[in-house]
Image (cartoon, rainbow, N blue to C red):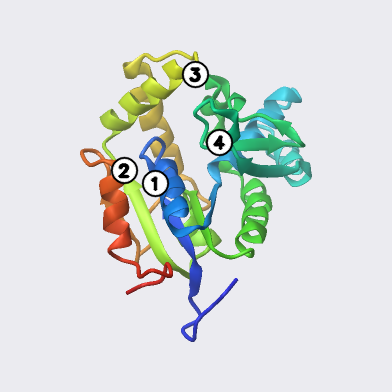
């Protein structure tokens, strides 16, 4: 990881925020704009959850889930060639599980899996290895606070729970899953509470994060805001 004289990472941009806030879309657009790689770390926690469900492991069994998280192999690749609207291709032990990660069963259980300290330690280690490649936009819930607290630019993308539920319903419908907005809204509020109140790496903006509310502005407008913070090399003006 490249550092300047201040010790801050000049080629890592951290983006955090709650579910369906638009942070992954922003991360993808920003990475493309800067010529950076993009990693949505949420896929790792979803993949660990999917692996546990597929293996018949009780997600309440912290020891077994943690062991599994340490063993699984995860990779992310460009998804554009598939032409099916995916932002990236997520591989679990070499298997493409991109759309399976959006299964409602995964969504219901991922917050519990992500709350385990051992799981977070295993996956943060994988995330840091990815970030060591340099020129990375990394998206998640604790990137600016835990994974890369020395990132030069930290963003926190948020939106109202109602707007996030509407977006998630549209996404679910497009993927053939249920799209009842009220049910999704209740689940989003439940996940927000779990993520923000968990003991290890709770969801919250870093003290020096730039907070952007995406409720009523477009992704392109957000990118313009972010580029206003950066010079042509992806560093602070």
User: Of the residues under marks 3 and 4, which one precedes in the sequence?
Assistant: 4
Q: Is residue 184 left or right of residue 225?
A: right
Q: Which residue is mark 3?
A: 175
- Total marks shown come to 4
Q: Say if mark 2 contacts mark 1, CB within 8 Å.
A: yes
Q: 207 or 232: which is nearer to us?
A: 232
The residue where tag 2 is placed is 219
Residue depicted at x 76% and y 25%: 55
State the residue position of label 1.
26
Dividing the picture into quadrants, the one containing residue 186 is top left
- Within-10-Å neighbours for mark 1: few <14, some 14–19, many 20+: many
Q: Report, in whole angstroms, how far the alpha carbon at label 1 lies from the one at label 4.
A: 16 Å
Left or right: 101, with 126 as reference point: left
Secondary element type, mark 2:
helix
* N-term mark: 2 or 1: 1
Looking at the image, residue 162 lies above or below residue 119: above
The answer to which of 78 and 156 lies nearer the viewer is 78
Name the residue located 68 percent from the left edge and 25 percent from the top edge: 53
**Residue at left offset 54%, top offset 63%:** 135
Label 2 and label 1: CA atoms lie apart by 6 Å
Quarter of the image with the N terminus is: bottom right
């Amino acid at each position: 990881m490249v550092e300047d004289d201040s010790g801050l990472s000049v080629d890592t941009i951290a983006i955090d925020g709650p579910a369906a806030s638009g942070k992954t879309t922003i991360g993808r657009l920003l990475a493309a704009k800067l010529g950076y790689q993009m990693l949505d770390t949420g896929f790792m926690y979803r993949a660990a959850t999917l692996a546990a469900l597929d293996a018949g492991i009780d997600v309440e069994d912290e020891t077994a889930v943690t062991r599994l998280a340490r063993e699984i192999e995860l990779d992310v690749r460009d998804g554009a060639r598939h032409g099916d609207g995916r932002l990236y291709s997520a591989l679990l032990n070499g298997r493409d599980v991109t759309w399976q990660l959006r299964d409602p069963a995964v969504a219901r259980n991922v917050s519990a899996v992500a709350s385990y300290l051992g799981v977070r330690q295993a996956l943060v280690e994988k995330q840091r290895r990815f970030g060591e490649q340099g020129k990375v936009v990394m998206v998640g819930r604790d990137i600016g606070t835990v994974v890369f607290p020395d990132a030069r630019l930290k963003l926190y993308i948020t939106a109202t729970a109602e707007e996030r539920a509407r977006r998630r319903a549209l996404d679910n419908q497009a993927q053939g899953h249920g799209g009842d907005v009220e049910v999704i809204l209740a689940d989003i509020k439940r996940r927000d509470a779990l993520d923000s109140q968990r003991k290890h790496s709770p969801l919250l903006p870093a003290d020096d994060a730039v907070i952007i509310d995406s409720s009523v502005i477009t992704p392109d407008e957000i990118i313009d805001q972010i580029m206003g913070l950066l010079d042509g090399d992806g560093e602070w003006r």
